[in-house]
Amino acid sequence: MNDQILRYTLHERVMHWAAGLTYLYLLAGGLAFYAPQLFWLTVFLGGGATARFWHPWAGLIFVGVTAWMHSAWQADMRFTPADRQWMKEVSKYIENKDDEVPPAGRFNAGQKEFYWVMFVGAIGLLLSGVVLWFPEYVPRSLGWLRQAAVIVHEVSALITIGAFIIHVYMGVFMVPGGIQAIVHGSVPAQWARKNHRLWFDRVTGGPSARE
Amino acid sequence: MSTLQIKAISGHAGTVPGRGAQREEGGGVCKLVDVTTCIGCKACEVACLEWNGYPFRETTFDNTYQTMPDTAWNYYNLIRFNEHEFADGTFGWLMRKDQCMHCADPGCLRACPADGAIVQYTNGIVDFQQENCIGCQYCVTGCPFDIPKFNPATKKMHKCTLCSDRVSVGLEPACIKACPTGCLHFGSKEDMTALAETRSAQLREHTSHKNAGVYDPAGVGGTQVMYVLHDIHNPAAYGGLPANPRVPLLVRLWKGPLKWLGNLAMVGGIIGVALHYLRFGPKKEEPPA
């Protein structure tokens, strides 16, 4: 049982960190434009005008990586009946009563929720971001579109930030082994068995896979 | 702004030029455009270009006297021509000098995220500081008059400065200086309001323009640029002057409640996960079997 199981291929890890790093870059610029108290963040991005220039381009990269991720993980991220069971007992998971948590697949329902929040958030950010990128082409009669784009961009960003805080907290602090898995790719077998029982059984031919 | 205004001049015969043109009291400086005496000569446009050092633009022809479609980043000031039929059936040209209104509650300044890119002086002038502008164009979204314009080469925003560089040394704005009919006036807001009220009363009493009035929209807290209009109930006839301009609701929502909600959510999120860690801690690692 001390064997290592490959949880994330190199391809998946590159994908994840490409998304993570572009998101962090976008977050720094976005927060600077969002709050005057955080405008100093632009100092690290080459000044306000430079930050404004690169923000939409970085956004395009983020959207591209999101689409890439979607092509790779779409199937893994579908909600299953097991996820509904898991979601019912989510308070047990939060309270670390892990023995009472129903078994999860390769991704548990919380991870899937995070994925879909970021996916939908990226679409909202893209659509509103295009308007914010080229406001000079929005005629005056469509002024409401510019105003709506600002609101949609900000609300979408705030929702992804909330999800991002939880994601980073869980990966780094709450679930030991989470960060190692996404950096190194392989996980100890007992870790996989504990946190992702259904997936563990599938890749090792365990009991639930034989049903 | 008044620190650079000349009060006395050594060895100088006569009065001090520009003395009394600008006062801190009386609601700041004000430009009054009496639309009813504008002849559409465009001297103000030329003066504006000359003072600001911009080239003249190519004209366009669209079957009217409107020889240029819009203001631009290097064209702050434009006469808008409109052919208009008055209520009594007579025909007239409505010619309005269009430029930044210098709102007391400037939507551009509210919307701007860049530290120091837009300032409002105590004399009421709202001025763009291009060195701090990041080119995001949020000011366009905030402005109810569609005034700020983008220079795509430098990625900076520009608009009428109300000649802050002239006014700060006690001169009147370039457009005022050039006006041949005296339809442009410059002085304190108080004085200009009195002048505008007198003029519109005169129009109501002595001409057929019974609805003449002063355009100083309260929705943006009043403006440092005012108009005397033949018909105060129909500002839209003057090239789309909004009847009741306000900083757009969504912009006020964005810079008001949404900001606080967002700050609360982000700080709350961080506090939330920290509390979770203190209360429940990390998950237990499975001992190797």
Image (cartoon, rainbow, N blue to C red):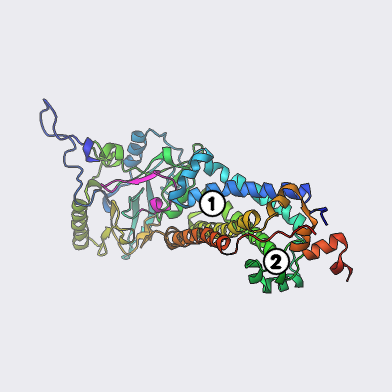
Work out whether residue B40 or residue B179 is closer to the camera in this orientation and state it.
Answer: B179
Which residue sits at x=61%, y=45%?
A58
Q: CA distance from mark 1 to mark 2?
A: 34 Å
Name the N-terminal-most of marks 1 and 2: 2
Residue B112 in sight in this render: no
User: Relative to B131, is A78 on the left or the right?
Assistant: right
Q: Amino acid at mark 1?
A: Leu
Q: Which residue is mark 2?
A: A109
* B189 shown above or below B151: below
Residue B119: mark in rendering: none
Mark 2: secondary structure? helix
User: Looking at the rendering, which quadrant does residue A111 occupy?
Assistant: bottom right
- The stretch of residues the image draws in magenta is B106-124
* B53 shown above or below A7: above
User: Looking at the rendering, which quadrant does residue A195 occupy?
Assistant: bottom right
Q: Measuring from the top left, give residue B224's x and y in whole percent.
A: 28, 51
Residue A162 in sight in this render: yes
